[in-house]
Amino acid sequence: MLSLSLLLTCVLCALSCRAGVLGERDSVYPRAGSLQQVTSFGSNPTNVGMYIYVPTNLATKPGIIVAIHYCTGTASAYYTGSPYATLAEQYGFIVIYPQSPYAGTCWDVSSQATLTHNGGGNSNSIANMVTWTIAKYNADTSKVFVTGSSSGAMMTNVMAATYPNLFAAATVYNGVPAGCFYSATNQADAWNSTCALGQSITTPAHWASIAEAMDPGYTGVRPRMQIYHGSVDTTLYPQNYYETVKQWAGVWGYNYDAPQATEANTPEANYVTTVWGPGVQGVFATGVGHTVPIHGDRDMEWFGFA
Ligand SMILES: *[C@@H]1O[C@H](CO)[C@@H](O)[C@H](O)[C@H]1NC(C)=O
């Protein structure tokens, strides 16, 4: 009996010693299977928080999804409130959850800095999180995606415009076009009522030129964009759906007035999916307010995991 308990003690000791070794590695590689903060990932001029979910079932050359929270949200709230960490375990990709540095936790989608490639704003910090993660985990650079809700959806459009080189595709849940929240006085984190109320209305070509000016040297392939919006959204008025799909149809060179397909009751009753081409698809949800629920399985298809 004594020798059995001694044996058990030794086994437990060995296990905890192993855990200690793994714990040391955690300081170099964030622990898998839970949300972890990364405090040093490169230049971070606007002090954006970086949180990461590395699945226990990590793929050998993993993809990355950047999942951006709404105003009042946090990385932790979006981690628990969105399906991406669960899906990460299924498909082996890494999720990055940036966290806004501002009171009220909206994103800066209004300053010149954030609306410029390597401009030193929030978008620059998030891009640096992506490049850090690619290097650290030997990630597949052809499988890097961005998604977000509300202010996070605005930021998703800004990321797609400022860093088209980084992202293969994006999904946007109730946002506004990149540049629509522009601040004439160059304020960071400004609210723009004209845009929110759906009164910033222009042509696909003009919206495209606004997005393209955010990374003027770029001539490569653009991220594929899937845009969701609800028809009775009174926070970011539904006109922003039309303006956003105009922007990306313009960037992709599609004729906004002649979509390729319109599918009623897709992906569910009262949602209409409109396809402008392989690069741009819109989903307008009749009777849905702010915001359209995240359609995780459909995101997986759009990103090519499923
Ligand atoms: C709000 O954004 C629009 C573009 O969408 C811009 O023309 C306008 O100047 C902005 N308003 C303020 C107060 O900066």
Image (cartoon, rainbow, N blue to C red):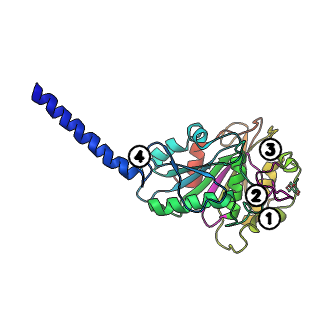
- Ligand 1 quadrant assignment: bottom right
Q: Is residue 259 visible?
A: yes
Q: Earlier in the sequence, mark 3 or mark 1?
A: 1
What amino acid does circle 3 point to? Leu
x, y percentage for residue 277? 69, 60
On-image quarter of the N terminus: top left
Q: Residue at x 74, y 66 (%)?
A: 214
Disc on res. 210: 1
**Mark 1 CB lies closer than 8 A to ligand 1:** no
SS for callout 2: loop
Residue type at mark 4 is Thr
Image x and y of residue 192, in percent: 84, 50
Mark 2: amino acid:
Ala
Does dot 1 land on a helix, a strand or a loop? Answer: helix
Q: Which residue is mark 2?
A: 178
Say if the magenta span includes residue 174.
Answer: yes
Q: What is the span of residues highlighted in magenta in the rendered image?
A: 163-191
Residue in front for this viewpoint, 35 or 23: 23
Q: Main secondary structure of the magenta part?
A: loop
Q: Looking at the rendering, which quadrant does residue 165 occupy?
A: bottom right
Label whose residue precedes the other's in the sequence (4 or 1): 4
Q: Is residue 173 visible?
A: no
* Residue, disc 4: 56
Q: Is residue 8 left or right of residue 229?
A: left
Could you tell me if the residues under marks 1 and 2 are in contact, i.e. CB atoms within 8 Å? Answer: yes
> Can residue 89 be found in the magenta stretch?
no
Residue at image position (74%, 65%) is 251
Asked if marks 4 and 1 touch (Cβ < 8 Å), the reply is no
User: What mark, if any, has residue 289 been given in the picture?
Assistant: none
Q: Secondary structure at mark 4?
A: loop
Which mark sits nearer the N-terminus, 3 or 2? 2
